[in-house]
Image (cartoon, helix red, strand yellow):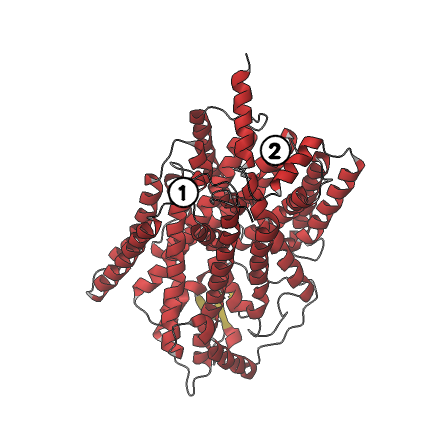
Amino acid sequence: MALSHRTGYVNPRLGTYFGIFISAFVAITLMTLILEGLGVGDNLLRHAMLFGPVALYAIIGATASTRTPIDYFAAGRRVPAFYTGLVVAQTALGATGLVALTGAFFMIGFDALCFVIGGLAGFVVMAVLLAPFFRKFGAFTVPSYLGRRLDSTTLRLVAGGILTVPMLLVLAAELRMGAHAVAWFFPISQTLCVMLLVALIVISVAGGGMRSLAWSSAGQSIAALIALLVPVAIVAVIVTNLPLPQFSAGPVLRMVGRAEAAQGLPIILPPALAFDIPGEGLGPIAKRYSDAFGSIGPLAFVIMTLSLLAGIASSPWLLQRVASTPGVYEARKSLGWATLLFGIAMLTIGAVAIFMRGYLTDIVTAVGPVRFPEWFEALKAHGFVTVSSDGRPTLSSFNISRDDVLLSLPIASEMPAVFTYLAAGGVVAAALAAGGAVALALGNILAEDIVFGLSWSPPQPTTRLTIARLALGTAAALAGLIALVAPTDPLKLLLWAIALTGASTFPVLVMSIWWKRLNVFGAVAGMVTGFGVTVLAIIAGEAGLTGTDGALAAAIGLPASVVATIAVALATPGPQKNIMELLRDIRVPGGEVLYDREMRYERRAKAQRP
């Protein structure tokens, strides 16, 4: 099969560069570990583990600055499949997923698998239905693709306005969770933490845009993966003698299951649409880990899986990364890497939850008088856990902070403090990677599709990049303001954003490739209907008017979008011949990048005008 035209060559020294980065990151960790053993003050250890890696990310981003639009918006279309897949997986997970889903697995067990299945299915659907064709088209943003695909600046503006809302929600969620992680290092105000993260994102990304983001976020993703894998692998060796927690947590889970049955943890049979996920703050262990559908009903489990599938597959902050790969083959391959790495991360998160439950189970199953170990008292001192019983504690008498389960495991296993700071630093890295990706995608939409959305002819490169950088800073600052003035649970913000994206964008994106009859009227109607219905469903759900959680709003919004798109498209004139020819070119994997060709035609026509 023919491959798409390549616009750049992959740097053969990338492996060397990131080998140096990994060596520097490991050296910082080992040196801090040695200093801790020598009795150096804890404050110095915190500074080293937070600001050492952050300085590396900032240096990578700042040194990748550029003055050319193709580098700023698409990294020159020469980011290899592995690095693209690594960053896509980490961006989809983000700090919110890394922290909140660990706590969700700990508290509701099996029911949290809907997030795993939905995420993996989203990558598969993106790889099969969307990513290769989006890469062949080569647009820098999703609204630009839709507008050019159906030859409508109105659709471009509508799509840009609609997609701004979920992207602000995701960015606000990442900033809030990243601020929570920074507060693990130093007890400073959330306002200062958010401002620090906004500044770091702008410094790391503004100079080179996608080029800076591609390499700085690759380093951040590697750091986050190391911070997630290393502490739990050490715990697995301590508990099971095997350094593979994803596979060796089974015996611990069986032990936990027997203790849960002996402790009398209830088997809950909720309604089909129940969606009782743990929120911020302290909460009890809700159910037995291995029992299915105790907190999330069977129908809600399916709805959430499909909502995540649609939302992740059509996420503008993820699809944008595909345009930076060298070709269609690499775009497909990058989603394969993303699926693998996302699956490994989610399996590891589940292992963290199992081992943490195992440590608490050891307390309640001990023979004789109950004596809380030192690590438990340390968790209580930090406010990560409380006991609601004055007598002999049971598993149901523990109240755990959802967003501190990941950090609690190194403390519970009595590791050196450096490993606790390593885990916290991994969350900061994840927040910077995901936040940078969303901020850049949102800034590009504001600049390309809102400011210059009424014209297909691009402005001068200097003006174009200046406006894009200003839009990036504006997007990051606005999201920071939302994170401060609307302190909603970051996991809820993420789920609302995914529901809005899936309901408003997924049907139109899929039909723009696979349905020839789609026209601009149907696309606008579908996006507006899906977005509007989903917003109303979220508001009604959170207000208790529908009896369902607002995170399930895509169950109404997505079908409404499909019906509106098809009905309006069939009731209005069909697409013109040039649009049909463009669709035919999109479906052919070989040849020139279509967006670059269209922009060249625009520049040529502009130069020939008197």
In percent of the image, x 56 and y 82: which residue is there?
Answer: 261
Please name the residue that numbered disc 1 is placed on: 9
- Compared to residue 247, the image places residue 473 above or below, namely above
Q: Disc 1 on helix, strand or loop?
A: loop
The image quadrant where one finds the C terminus is: top right
First along the sequence among labels 2 and 1: 1
Please name the residue that numbered disc 2 is placed on: 148
- Is residue 281 in view from this perspective? no
Horizontal side of 233 relative to 166 (left or right) equals left
Residue 121 position in % (x across, y down): 59, 58
Residue type of the residue flagged with mark 1 = Tyr
- Is residue 499 in view from this perspective? yes
Report the disc number at residue 494. none
Q: Disc 2 on helix, strand or loop?
A: helix
Horizontal side of 265 relative to 405 (left or right) equals right
In percent of the image, x 70 and y 57: which residue is there?
Answer: 547
Residue type of the residue flagged with mark 2 = Arg
Horizontal side of 106 relative to 539 (left or right) equals left
Within 10 Å of the Cα at label 2, are there few (<14), some (14-19), or many (20+) other Cα atoms? many
- Compared to residue 552, the image places residue 132 above or below, namely above
Of the pair 139 and 356, the residue shown nearer to us: 139
Number of numbered markers: 2
Q: Nearer the viewer, mark 2 or mark 1?
A: 1
Of the pair 98 and 59, the residue shown nearer to us: 59
